[in-house]
Image (tube, grey):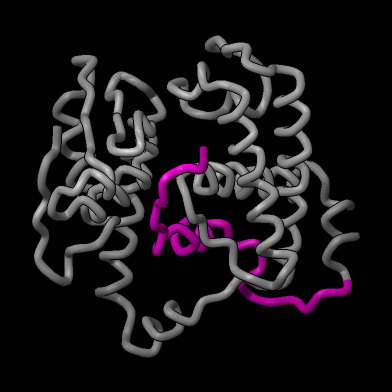
Amino acid sequence: MIEHLDLAAPYDTPLVAAAVVASAADRLAGDCGTIVIPRSTFGLEGGELLDEAGALLQAFEFSDRLRLIDTALAASEEASRQVRERLGRRRVERWEEGPDEEADEDNWQLSARTATVLQAALEDLSQQAWEEVVALDDEPLVRGAAGLFAELPPLTFHRPRAWRKHMARAFGDLCADLDAGKTPYPRCTGEEMALHLAIRQAKTLLHDRPNRVTDLVHELPVSEDDFDWEACLDLLFEDFTDYPAAA
């Protein structure tokens, strides 16, 4: 169990903390190890930073006080890789960018076309999620199963109907943010997973359904930031703060 993580400014960020935890996970990879991360509700010093790091690494919510990372899972390895890549990009950007570019990043917003396609992806996934909630009920999933919930980490495969309903609502809540003109920053682990899936779905729409995308965005202004999904992955999760999941 990681009980304490003390990082000095300016390195006391969730992304740096996640990279440190990912390094610990690498040491256990292949040994079927499990890393236990306290959540902010555990009461340990630095718990909030560790909690946010665990969310970035897609650690499983074992309880309202603990997260788990199963180092034997491919999902854990992929999450660690993404964290390291994001940290590497951020380091290079900080060296290459001047003050004006850093200010531009702080003021970054979704372009209208990007937001519209992302909203369409969330609507599609929301409908699919609710259909699967009804079809699956409390039935556990098995590895290799088809469907949206089968794309989540395997540790979620045995979660009950109530948990799946909460996950399905996450797609709708993020979609409502976009509908209200807000940037869809995730507010819990469920919304973070939902947003990752929606960005991937948005990429698929652009590739597989270009006519649908054209119909959605043809009246919207063109921006050089249109469909920059890497920026979405890098910046929409930057200020992610996880709250205890609803019952």
Q: Is residue 96 above or below residue 136?
A: below
Q: Is residue 80 visible?
A: yes
- Examine the image and state in which quarter residue 67 appears: top left
Q: Residue furthest bottom?
A: 100
Of residue 4 and residue 203, the one placed in the foreground of this image is 4
Of residue 64 and residue 219, the one placed in the foreground of this image is 64
Q: Is residue 15 above or below residue 155?
A: below
Q: Residue at x 51, y 76 (%)?
A: 108
Q: Residue at x 14, y 32 (%)?
A: 1
- Examine the image and state in which quarter residue 127 appears: top right
Residue 229, image x and y in percent? 57, 57
Residues in magenta, as a range: 219-247
Q: Is residue 81 above or below residue 156?
A: below
Q: Is residue 60 left or right of residue 227?
A: left
Of residue 202 and residue 207, the one placed in the foreground of this image is 202
Q: Is residue 152 above or below residue 142?
A: below
Q: Residue at x 32, y 88 (%)?
A: 99
Q: Residue furthest front?
A: 247
Residue 240, image x and y in percent? 41, 58
Residue 156, image x and y in percent? 49, 24
Residue 59, image x and y in percent? 35, 35
Tell whether position 240 is magenta.
Answer: yes
Count the marks: 0
- Examine the image and state in which quarter residue 92 appears: bottom left
Tell whether position 209 is magenta.
Answer: no
Q: Is residue 104 left or right of residue 149?
A: left
Q: Is residue 84 visible?
A: no
Q: Residue at x 82, y 45 (%)?
A: 209
Q: Main secondary structure of the magenta part?
A: loop
Of residue 241 and residue 160, the one placed in the foreground of this image is 160
